[in-house]
Amino acid sequence: MSDESLHPWNEPLAHTLARDRDRLPHGLLLAGPRGLGKNAFARWLAEWLLCAAPAANDRACGHCQSCQLLGVGSHPDLHVVQPEAVYKSSPGLLARYALRYPPEDKGKDSKDSTVIRIDQIRALIEASQTRPQIAARKVLILSPADTLNTNAANSLLKLLEEPPPDSQLILVADRPARLPATIRSRCTRVEFRLPDANVAGAWLQAQGLSGADAERLLALAGGAPLEAQSLAGSE
């Protein structure tokens, strides 16, 4: 597995979770502003939880069957649900897994859905009821979870109230306040905060930006490194 899935400013959070691998709460809510690498963190967490022999540095081993299957997008124990518009416009590993859970009954001329729909959650719940096929547990990721429509959120609540054994639910949200309080109360919140400007600037420079550009774009992005990187690639 590649270390690129975990950003340097999120490594302390990763280390904190890694200490409790066997005692993690069933539901985790990764919450914080856009552009801090929460999806990358969710990917790291999935890699690490599914790995048969995680390394001492809080990384997956990269060699076991789980790691090999996850990297090529075919691990049967990783399940990702995203709005259709998100997984079609955001290439990456999570989007490849989200293709397994498209919204149903979509007309040919319909626009791509921007919300997570109830049929997607029902399919996820059905998949969660079976035992893991390869890894010790299943990992279920919803991103962005704050796009759940009302019916989907009510359906997800049932999964949180009666979690299947050997499963880990990870919700990713830029705007967690949009989630119903009943869902938030059943998840342990993992708070993502803006990194130190020096750490963010050093990372941006490692991506090829000059020091002056990194500082300017960070200011425009409100201190969020990935937003600053996105601005660097725009006009």
Image (tube, rainbow, N blue to C red):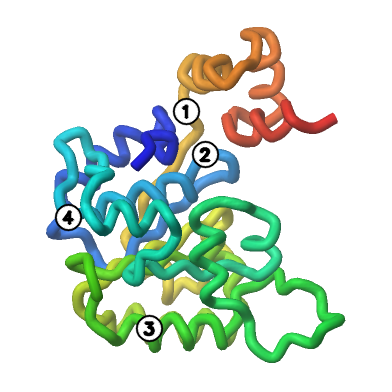
Q: Amino acid at mark 2?
A: Leu
In this view of the protein, can residue 169 be seen by the observer?
no
Real-space Cα distance between discs 2 and 1? 8 Å
The quadrant in which residue 15 appears is top left
Q: Give the residue pinned by disc 4.
A: 52
Q: Secondary structure at mark 1?
A: loop
- C-alpha distance separating marks 3 and 2: 30 Å
Q: Which residue is mark 1?
A: 195
Mark nearest the camera among 1 and 4 is 4
Q: Decide: is 219 above or below 99.
A: above
* Up-down relation of residue 86 to residue 8 (above or below): below
Precedes in sequence: disc 2 or disc 1: 2
> Mark 4 to mark 3: distance in Å?
21 Å
Residue type, label 4: Ala
- Say which element carries label 3: helix
- Whichever of labels 3 and 2 marks the residue nearer the N terminus, that label is 2
Q: How would you rate the neighbour count of disc 2 (Cα within 10 Å): few for under 14, some for 14-19, many for 20 or more?
A: many
Tell me which label, 4 or 2, sits earlier in the chain: 2
User: In the displayed structure, does residue 143 sit left or right of residue 126?
Assistant: right
The disc at residue 127 is: 3
- What's the CA distance linking mark 4 and mark 2? 28 Å
Q: Give yes or no for contact between labels 4 and 2 (Cβ–Cβ under 8 Å).
A: no
